[in-house]
Amino acid sequence: MKKLPLTLLLAFCTASLSAAENPNILVIYTDDQGYGDVSCLNPESKFQTPAIDRLAAEGMTFTDGHSGDTVCTPSRYMLLTGRYSWRTRLKSGVFGAETPCLIEGDRITLASLTKQHGYDTAMIGKWHLGMEFHGERGSRDWTQPVTDMPLDKGFEYFFGIPASLNYGILAWFQGRHAPVPPTLFTAKKPNQLAISDYRIMPPYDGPPAKFSQPNEIGLFKGPIEVASDFVDSECLTRFTDETLDWLKKRDSEKPFFIYLPYTSPHKPVIPIEPFRGKSAAGAYGDFMMETDWHIGRILDYLDENNLTDNTLVFFSSDNGPETTWPERKKRYDHASNGIFREGKRSIYEGGHRVPYFVRWPAKVAAGSQWNQPVTQGDLLATVAQILETELPANAGEDSVSLLPALTGDAANQTSIPIIHHGVSGRFAIRDGDWKLVMESRNKKDKRELYNLAEDPGETTSVLKDHPAIAEKLLAELTRITASGRTTPGGASPNDTDWWSNLHWMEPWKN
């Protein structure tokens, strides 16, 4: 056999070693799962989550981990880009299924970053960051490709749905097309399993002559576009099966990055038959048990294929629990928000303090904890440091690497203030133990200050007792909001000029 030149052989070995050392990365993202919906975080939980608990036992638990916002779209934006969504055109609320993607075409994402470093990249699940379709509702051309979607943001493979199930255009999209396109129509149907819930399930109808009936979802009126083979209760199974299938078919010589955003426990709460009645928290608890079981299927695959040790698994949720949590607490004595105040959409801790685990056996000590505040946006800078690359000035503006914390180098872990943001645009800032909650734009909700070390449930504002701390936090909030970034670095302005929810600041233009 002909020998390779020594220089070429050394280059080949170095490249192979580098690729082998880079960890596989799996991001599992649940939808509306509260801090108290993980049994290892909630001793009083009325159901068990053994697979998620395993991530904690074998990795690091971040007890003070936060989503980038309190609802779907903005949190997903921050997770993938390391930047607060309120810096973009989306100042409040969420997107529907159909709109230009919130992630700008040239913005670095977790997918594009890892792809640049030789990873196979895949996204399987719920997107909810905007896609564009050919034609309008009632007159689509489904032979035309979907654009401005995951395949344009660094992902090489996509299987999933455009947004939450109540926002329509429901089909099993694979790449830029749905093999069975959403040419039928439906409305939300009653769901007898869960509290204040609905179903998206057959029978479906042909195209109606007019879109005149309200669908009661707030973003548009009229029936939901749906494919004949789409059933809401199949989402978790389909997404898990597709993930396992992709793992089996991937190029095993390359590391992989998978983004797996599940649709649970977001409404509709529809556990499949084997899980019904298994929890002591009604259908919601059953649904969480099913979700955990699917996560366990993926962890088992990693074990069986000797992938566990060098796979970084990141697990979290996009925001706190849906507003059914008070009734669930009343009926079942299960607190989806744990000890924290309120839930989804709220500026208080229950709206954005979420389960947050990282398992990477090759580098992260089993059963370790980090108790300082962090955000999901920190994942981008963390991955960049793992890959030994510098992010440019216009990437990850609000992201700080957690690699020192993960690897036991606590003394070198950087900490930065965190900005919280409610669904209606209300702001808060967190720095250390202190959290300043700003008044709402209409001044109906007043300014508040909390010491979370002493009052994690945010029961009593101490604003009057600590005016100097409040003023310092306000100055930080103003600087961070106007400057376009939290981290040190070059200029990277917000995408818009001043907006009305920044009522405490002087108006400014970029």
Image: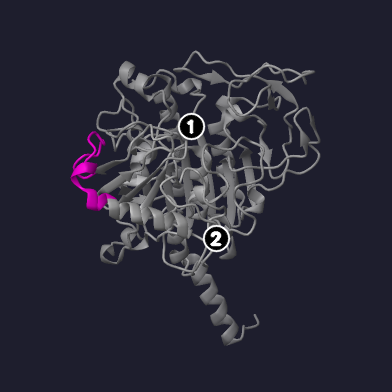
- Give neighbour class at mark 1: few <14, some 14-19, many 20+ (Cα, 10 Å): many
Mark 1 sits on what residue? 264
Percent across and percent down for residue 180 are: 73, 32
Label 2 residue SS = helix
Q: Quick one: quadrant of the N terminus?
A: bottom right
Q: Which residues are magenta?
A: 452-470
Q: Residue at x 56, y 49 (%)?
A: 247
Protein image colouring: one colour
Q: Identity of the amino acid at label 1?
A: Ser
Real-space CA distance between mark 2 and mark 1, rounded to the nearest whole angstrom = 26 Å
Q: Is residue 403 above or below residue 97?
A: below
Q: Is residue 399 rendered to the left or right of residue 333?
A: right
Percent across and percent down for residue 326 are: 35, 22
Q: Is residue 133 rendered to the left or right of residue 56?
A: right
Q: Residue at x 70, y 18 (%)?
A: 204
Mark 2 sits on what residue? 114
The reply to whether the magenta stretch includes residue 453 is yes
Instruction: Looking at this view, name the residue that lies furthest to the front.
Output: 506
Residue 130 seen: yes
Count the marks.
Answer: 2
Q: Quick one: quadrant of the C terminus?
A: bottom right
Which quadrant would residue 137 be assigned to in this image? top right
The circle drawn on residue 293 is: none
